[in-house]
Amino acid sequence: MRFIAKSLLLAALFLFSSTCVEAQFSENREINRWLRKKPDIKLIEINFTKDSTFFKADKIRAILFSKTDNFLRSVKSDRRRKVQRETIRRDTAEVKYLYLSNGFLGVQVMETFEPMLPDSSALIRISIHEGRRFVYDSIYIEGDYEEQFEGNFEKIIKDFKKGEPVDPFELKQATYDIKSVLANNGYPYAKAEYFVDTLYDYTKNNADVTFKISADSLVHFGDVHIGGASKFDSSLARRELTIRPGRIYRRKDVIESQKRLLETGYYLTLYLSQASGDTLRKFNRLRPDFALSLREKKPYYVSIKTGAAQDSLKDLTWTLSGSWGKRNLFKSRLLELTASSSFIVFTEWRLKDHSYRFRITEPWFLGIRMPMTLTAQYSPGVRTAIEDQDYRKESWSVSVSTIRKIKDKIKIQTGLQYESVNIYGLSEEDQERLKQEEGISIRRKVFVDIVRDSRDHPFTPSRGSLTSLGYEYIGGFLGGDDSFIHIEASWSRYQIVWPGWISASRLKAGYVRERGESETVPVDDRLYIGGANTVRSFSEGTLGPRLTNGDGSTPEGANIIIIANQEFRYHLIGKFWSSLFVDVGNGFRNKNEIKWTHLAIAYGTGIQFLSPAGPIRIDYARRLKTETFDAADKIHLTILYAF
């Protein structure tokens, strides 16, 4: 939110300076005509008044919108190397922001343009008068408000330390935060202003700051009038609202209501606002009604998907699927029917498999906003020849899952999955052999996943954390071919440690163990690490216990994994970023193998391009030589950050 306030004030500086652009450019019409041709910028000259010495000229040039023309900027066609219509506004706003945020409340900035012979390129002169630099002295809060808010206000202003430079952007953000506290507790008409006293002592640069607050009147919600609900019952929209008649007005309830309505999947767009005139009519001012305007999606939909992939046998497969769905079955349930077929192409042309899926979602399970999804899938199989025997592998599965959000950051998902596989046309001995060769294993499980996500962005986070804990119970009383438990926990933290530098840290651990009659955890269900997203410098899934045979050794999977990552990400240019990282970890058969000397350590650097689909990255990793591992290096190319 602090960034938003600063951005708005910077925009205000930008717009203010635009009112005098023509006068500041030049009063000479010939000069203005020359500037409209967008001449190249050859030189940027920074002039300070005699007592202005706080910032160096290079610092000023670094923040300017204008850049001098050079070969690299010409190749990139950087528009900032030429005088643009917004050049003076952008330059002036950037310089003023720099000085204002450092306490120079009376800074004056003037920018002029002159043609340079022989090619009429532009000389930009920026003249700066810093004025006095003010620092915080005493901070006062006064006004008309409930005593219960005193603690909230003190938390907001606690960051204004005595002796630090007065920052009007931070002060403006503080007034916004104060009004937000009041608006979220029944006072939407509250006002907050700040005043900086710079006149009481001319011999010092200390300044008192006073916040004046007027809470106004306590407000309660009125009714909500819903319009545009024709395909879906209006009660579906009303139950998503956290606005209730008579409840104390909270701005958070208005925002949360809009968010919940969009999450239903029923609406393309919506608009929720106070009913027209409510703030003007005195009798509705303290109990305003709201108007909700909806634009609905169609109740039916059809989708077709297709794509190519490579299966484990190196055959090229082509998949075609089609879905039909109804969003308002029995008023609010979502029904989806899907048919999918997969074909092997080029090496041979035949149908590989086909399946049919039925899925129904109840958005308010047990009257609670906790969507429950029931999925049933059936695959009749395709007759296939093996050693002159025709067989068919039929499978079906049923799963039920539900998800519950706690506030905005925590999500809990739990469910049950039951599946069965039948093989027809083979003897029991041949069936067992086929299951081993194709990795066919009947899985029946109960699972719980808990995720807390406070990141500011899912792909390129700079703040916040991501914590997850997953538990799976496979087999046991549910039946199936195998019985084991699988637990995995992960914690990631993101923070800005230096302007333009982001620290990303992760700790991750996993554990699987057989249960009941199972002697071991199946190979395919063990834990595999190593590669671009865990411990770099290893190929995918090759770090951890290995099984030695006549042809060498192959990964057999681990029962325990431990991973620690530290990465520093910094901006290069444009959409390109770079990173420095250290990865530590390994996989183990049992806890007795866990030793410091058994951990693999890798370090390296990478480059990322921030595409619309997420970061595309190339990492170079170098492995340290230890008692357990030899030195080696590897290049990884993948999409998205490792964590």
Image (spheres, grey):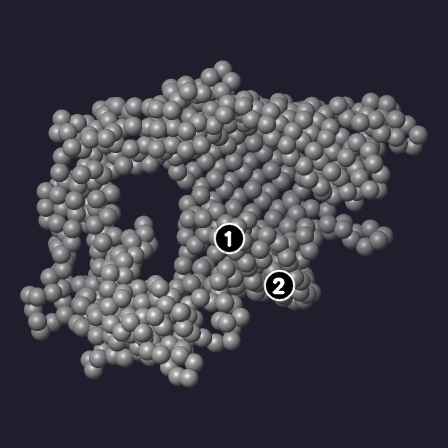
Residue furthest toward the left? 200
Relative to 12, residue 108 above or below:
below
Mark 2: which secondary structure? strand
Q: Is residue 92 visible?
A: yes
Q: Quadrant of residue 335?
A: top right
Residue furthest toward the bottom? 118
Q: Quadrant of residue 435?
A: top right
Tell me which residue sits at (38%, 28%) in the image.
Answer: 294
- Residue under circle 2? 621
Say few, some or many: other residues with alpha carbon within 10 Å of mark 1 (under 14 / 14 to 19 / 20 or more). Answer: many
Residue furthest toward the top? 330
Relative to 281, residue 465 above or below:
below
Foreground of the two, 560 or 448: 448
Foreground of the two, 102 or 466: 102
- Residue under circle 1? 506
Q: Amino acid at mark 2?
A: Ala
Dot placed on the residue nearer the N-terminal end, 2 or 1: 1
Mark 1: which secondary structure? strand
